[in-house]
Image (cartoon, rainbow, N blue to C red):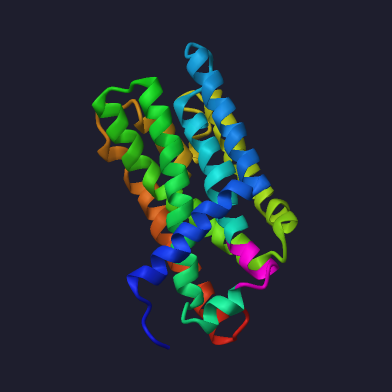
Amino acid sequence: MKRLTKEQKKALFYKDLLDLRWNGQVLFNVIICLLVTIIFLWYPRQDLPISFVIGFTFAMVTMFTQGNLVVEEREQGTLRRLQQVGFSIKDVLIIKMFVSFLVTSVLVFLFLLFYRFDPTISFNLLVLSFPVIIIMLLAGTFVGLQAKNTIEVSLYGTPIALFYLFLEGLLMNHQLGYMQWIALFPNYHLYYGVTSDSLLPYLLTPYLWMIIVVIVFTWWFMNKMRTNDL
């Protein structure tokens, strides 16, 4: 298979980016996230932590955007056409991850811009968010490859999103010294690490989760490729 040119990669990237304008499910999720963000900004003294707003974006936008972008190629029958002109499945997935990452980055940037974080908190948020974004991108890719249509993406992705938000709900009522098992999940470290003066104690768990998820996904994907089951 011939190597893709930069122009070909850019063409697919822009095509996916422009297609988002007509993707009703993605637009709906983005609007819901913006509403949650606006409510948070209007009522900053309410018991709604920063990590919940950011986590809501990761669960509802990052994962579902990626899942819908992946499954639509199969649903519309364009994945085979892309392969015929030189795109591998891996190329297609990586480019779609860049699109989903860009959408997520815009929403996070708007949140940071209007909430006016100080540099330390902004830095903490970005560093601790990165592994969660990667995990959600891979979860969305997995869901998109397993689903046959956008309805199944919502069906398969909803339990993942609900579990993530369930953990956030527990953290909103969490007291140090109780339910210590929550510290096994990245949510805990994003929740407490964002406003912490020392970031280092909160880095290990999220990045360890990211490494594990990347390894497991790569193993699963390579097996699928070997059996030609994609």
Residue 164 in the image: above or below residue 145: above
User: What residue is shown at x 58% (from left), y 58% (from top)?
Assistant: 69
Q: Dividing the image into 4 quarters, which one contains the C terminus? A: bottom right
Taking the image as shown, residue 46 lies to the left or right of residue 193, namely right
Q: Is residue 47 above or below residue 101?
A: above
Query: Looking at the image, is 42 positioned above or below residue 176?
Result: above
Q: x and y percent of residue 100 in the render?
A: 48, 52
Vertical arrangement, residue 51 with respect to residue 153, above or below: above
Write the residue at 25% across / 31% down: 198
Image point (66%, 67%), residue name = 146
Identify which residue is drawn at 42% across, 35% down: 108
Residue 164: x, y in percent? 57, 42
Q: Quadrant of residue 143?
A: bottom right
How far across and how far down the image is residue 32, in percent? 62, 32
Taking the magenta stretch, the answer to whether it contains residue 2 is no
Our reading of the magenta stretch's main secondary structure is: helix
Q: Is residue 213 visible?
A: no
Q: Quadrant of the N terminus?
A: bottom left
Q: Is residue 74 magenta-colored?
A: yes
Range shown magenta = 70-78
Between 23 and 132, which is closer to the camera in this rendering?
Answer: 23
Q: Nearer the viewer, residue 58 or 92?
A: 92
